[in-house]
Image: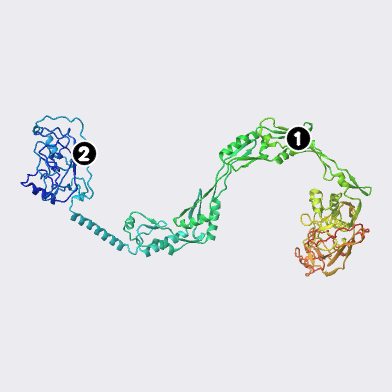
Amino acid sequence: MSGTNGTDGSEHENDDVRPAEPDSRDSSEKESNSASAPTEQFAAFAPPPTGDNSPNEPDDRAGRTADSPAGPDTDEPSPSDAPTTVIPVVKRPGRGEEPSTTPLQRSSDTPAPKPVGSTPLPTSESRPAQPQDSRPAQDSRSAQDSRPAQDSRPAQPPASPPTPPPPVAPPPGGNSGSSGDGSGPWWSGLPKRTVALVVGGIVALLAVLYVADLAISSGKVPRGVTVAGIEIGGEPLDEAEAHLREVLTERLDEPVRVLAGETTGEIVPAQAGIGIDWDATLDRVGSQPLNPFARLASFFGTEEIGVVSTRDDAALVVALDEFTAAAAYAPREGNIVFEGGTPVPVIPQPGQRVDIATASDVFAERWAFGEVSLPVEQVDVTVTREGLDRALADIAVPAVSADLVVRGRDGTAATLARDQIGAVLSFVPDGNGGLTPEYHPEAAVEILAPQLEPTETEPRDARVEIQGGSPAVVPGVKGELVDWAKTLETFPQLLAVTDDRAVDAVYQTVDPELTTEAAEKLGINEVIGEFTTGGFEYASGVNIRLAAAEIDGAVVKPGETFSLNGYTGPRGTAEGYVESGIIEAGRPGKAVGGGISQLATTLYNATYFAGMEDVAHTEHSYYISRYPAAREATVFEGAIDLQFRNPFDTGVLIQTITTSSDVTVRLWGTKTVNVQSITGERTNYTDPNTITLPAGPGCIASAGAKGFTVSDTRVVTDAKTGAQISNATRTVRYDPVPVVKCVEPDEKDGADSEGDQGAGDAPAPASPAPAPASSTPESVPVGAPAQAPGEDVADTAEPIAQPETAAPPRRQPESVSIPEPAGTSAN
């Protein structure tokens, strides 16, 4: 019969059948001397116990399979009907030893047990069969199954499929599978010495390879190392450094593509202050690893160590600032705008920004790779799409559903059309994801008020007029105006409804700004100051009369400040003003509105003697003989103004009287002070320069005049007691009037070379001399009345005489401080 190992060619191929030894004890000793193996268990169909079989002896039926037929010489049931039994392999004790269940290890000369069948049970020297799952296809079962004649009993089909034996796990530390039947590692059947030699040889070979690899790679860059994508692994250190320096130095001067979101640009690292720290970069390369596993892994991967950069932070920020600014954009909040009468939703969109500090760090770290992606931060919006849709449906759409109508008096109505709603309604985020409406009633008033203006009565201030040589109060008129605040107080509710969008206008009575009662209490009843000037030419007279008419009747309330430029407004051609004399570039010239300085001087002197407080005034750059020295003023629209303040408890009325040759200004009020002017001696004379200009409209000849310094002292006393209230001195330095010669082109060659300076060569005015009481104004001529050609300024007609001392004082006011001149001159 075939053995349990079949014909697999192993050394135990025919060990399953051996003749019985005369002395079973020798066989037992052989087993005991064999390599000890753990107790093996074999699954088999065990027959009922008989008296011929000792329980300590192995049963040869352990080698049967479930489909093997019963032997002809036994009455035992079919193997398929027999219960599965686990039969332990028991070691037979030697001489003088107790039986024990030591593991079985079959040697090459140990016979295998015979299969269960019609043959007698094997002797004690027989060994149990190997597990049936390791038998090859040439197992003895095939031979038995192919010989039915040897079985005297008819074959009986099994009642049920046999239960396969459970897998046998080898005991710990055992040598299961050493027979080469596939139940253990391939080397388990080899002698231990052989295994040890093989393992030692492998280890020695690996050690030799490791040492050889370490020796070969000594002085080289570790395998797999890359720097900014440059592969230098395995290169000698000096060659690797030269390689890196060559490639990376070129990259410093090459543009690097920079990305931030969807924005792209280019930055040259060297221009952005980027350099390379070679020592730190090469230190990152490191030395050859000693760990064998690390060396083995280096054959299959790479290690990027990057570049250590130096940087100029200021230059880097400048280079990145423009790019980051272009990459950033503000969030677009959800909103609703109106296009005509249609509300249009503005879909919210998050913004984007780039942190310049983070961008600098990232660029310095990644520039060597040729492309840098800068991190961007999203700037969230506060309005959600749901909040936008809600405001659109609940507020915006109803607001434009119909026109809004305000009904006024006499059947007059004002209409706010649907396509105008966008001017009076807007939206802002509410902080909770929605939109809050903002209503603008003032915009609605701008649209509605002009339509109801015919139904209103404007209030008219009370006036003080000179009638019959004395002031009289003209009563004011109350007005009837629409109270738009009350009319539109339900404005949000009106826009929320879709029908009946009409409301009645609410009118209110409005008092004038100056009521009749207030005008009567101003105390305007007598002249408190007056002054007259004359001697102006025709064009100047036109401008003087226009400006005088504008300020005639002006009332200056107690504590108020009057401004000549502010009261008259623009003085241009549209207002009827004409071209007249000014001082320009230190010499006489012409401009529209010239000559107003004569009115300014007249008004200044009237306020001077009325005791008004001087707020701002400026003298001419050079002296004009028809004005009192150190007590005159010039103005220039938008640059030089005349301002005074009413310091009294009563009002002041300005009255102007003009003729073709002079202008008079009177101030009416309540007389409380007397004012005296004391003019000092002229000193520090300076000679004029000579200017020669081509003859023509641009040249106005002048004989010139000397400059000098003079002072004026104003003494203010109480009109009732005569007690002095103030004593202030103002010192003014006048520049010389230049000698202007207008020369024809053929005469210019023979002109005196000393005085021939040519057009535009006028010397700058002399510096002002120091003054004891106040600083002298700078000579920055802006405008003044022009002198007639060939007229000597010093011989100009004197102003109309004015009393130096006014009427006896009545009450003592606060002392008045006269400010120093601003230092410029004009017309």
- Horizontally, is 558 left or right of 154 in the view? right
The amino acid at mark 1 is Ala
Q: Percent from the top left, x then y, of residue 797?
A: 90, 61
Q: How many labels, in total?
A: 2
The residue that label 2 is drawn on is 165
Name the mark on residue 520: none
Instruction: Give left or right: position of 737 versus 497.
Output: right
Nearest the viewer among 554 and 594 is 554
Given residues 72 and 427, the one toward you in this image is: 72
- The kind of secondary structure element at disc 1 is loop
Q: Is residue 59 visible?
A: yes
Q: Nearer the viewer, mark 1 or mark 2?
A: 2
Specify whether residue 706 is in view: no
Circles 1 and 2, Cβ within 8 Å, touching? The answer is no
Quadrant housing the N terminus: top left
Instruction: List the residue tagged with mark 1.
Output: 505
Residue appearing at x 69%, y 41% in the figure: 440
